[in-house]
Image (tube, rainbow, N blue to C red):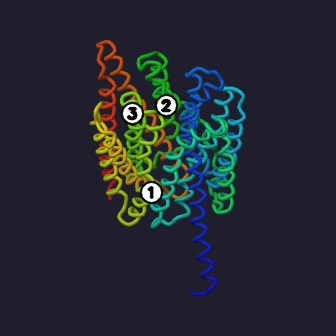
Amino acid sequence: MHPGELESRSSIALGKWGVLLAVGVGGFMSSLDGSVVNTILPVIRGAFGSDVASVEWVVTVYLLVVSGLLLSVGRLGDMRGNKSVYVGGFAGFVLASALCGLTPSVPALVVFRGLQAVAASMLFANAPAILTKNFPASQRGQALGLQSAMIYLGLTAGPSLGGWLATLLGWRSVFYINVPVGLLALLLSQRFIPPDVVTRDTEPFDLAGAGTFILGLVAFLLALNQGFSWGWASWPILSLLATAALALIVFVTIERHAPYPMLDLSLFRRRLFAASTASALLNYMGLYGIVFLLPFYLIQGRGLTPMAAGILLTAQPVAMAIVAPISGTLSDRIGSRLPSSLGMLILAAGIVLLSRLGPQSPLTMATVGLAVAGVGTGIFVSPNTSALMGSAPHERQGIASGVLATARNVGMVTGVGMAGAILTTILARSEMAGSSAALYDGVTLGLLAAAGAAALGAITSLARGS
């Protein structure tokens, strides 16, 4: 082989893995921030003397803003280039993180977290598109699996790192740590991610579609998020659900007739794309049923300290981080249908195992159940993501990323809302009857519902075809 040709091929290979490094660091940072803030909410509340309802908005506003904007910034990536939107997201994330650390009050922190969420949505909605464009189909699953591993490592490290930083340097350091990590990721992104060839920069942005989608989705997610606090039959929750239904009907009508829609609904006519999207939503419903319910079982039911419960709960993301790259690489050879469907079945089996936990169950049983669920999710995520992204045309990679991220967030909130509704209903009934076993009953029924969602996800995964 000619030396010049060898050097050219080496440069291409280095650039490809450099892209993965840049996106991986970004995934680690964003997932770390998403998990770390939850652990320091009590510290923030004490520092400002705030009430619980106010400080909870530090987390809630982040979730709502990210979810509402994912499709819009994914579409923007298709129109203006995924790299430019992604790099802009990093710059905004670093700035917003610094502002969060400097905040003088809880209301200001909520505003700055909203700005941080705007930037985070730009990262979440464009990262899979960047990887898909820069890796061949034969390595797409491997690349997405390695990125998933970085995300799960961030989720694993978040709670312990947040507690350590808050204890050693104060809670503001939890936000400041994003500044050097974000700057590193920004430099890597500028260096390794190649610029996009933009072919749709003259298309107008669908403001009407974006506005109605944001209104509908935020109303829906807020209802799910606050349902067990405000009461599922209360007029605010019913009003939010009615608003969501009306707005989303209007959104579909707008998108069907818009010359340049924000969401190309024809994507869902592709069976592989539609089945992968539905499977992703159901996967996160099952997974976040565990995330919500297991801490109640471990801390309130079994008397573990939050630190001990946190250590035990890491069994799930650690298993996911180990398995995801292997499954992604395997799916490049055998396709996505078998590993994705098998992963969902294993997730369902792990949740069923967790539902068998009682007041005297050995904690090793909880560890095993969490690990099994983590293995199932790790097997599922990379092949399913690769299939979804691969089924979308090149010029729709940004919106495909946005659809995937939206399905993930909706699944997370729906899973928590479903589990919370079941648990609070059982607890309320037991208080009237004077039962002391209500917590275990509520956790068991909530987990069985989550297992049902995972089993349904196995069916939708099989429906994708070969």
State how far apart marks 2 and 1 are (Cα): 26 Å
Q: 273 or 8: which is nearer to us?
A: 8
> What residue is pinned by disc 1?
386
Mark 3 vs mark 1: give the one in front: 3
> How far across and how far down the image is residue 336, in percent?
37, 58
Question: Can residue 202 be seen at all in this image of the molecule?
Answer: no
Mark nearer the N terminus (2 vs 1):
2
- Position above or below: 394 against 424: below
> How far across and how far down the image is residue 464, in percent?
34, 53
> How far across and how far down the image is residue 313, in percent?
42, 41
Question: Can residue 314 be seen at all in this image of the molecule?
Answer: yes
Mark nearer the N terminus (2 vs 3):
2
| Amino acid found under the numbered disc labelled 1 | Ser
Bin the neighbour count of mark 2 within 10 Å (Cα to Cα): few under 14, some 14-19, many 20 and up.
many
> What residue is pinned by disc 3?
298
Q: What secondary structure is marked by label 2?
A: helix
Image quadrant where one finds the C terminus: bottom left
- Position above or below: 271 against 206: below
Mark nearer the N terminus (3 vs 1):
3
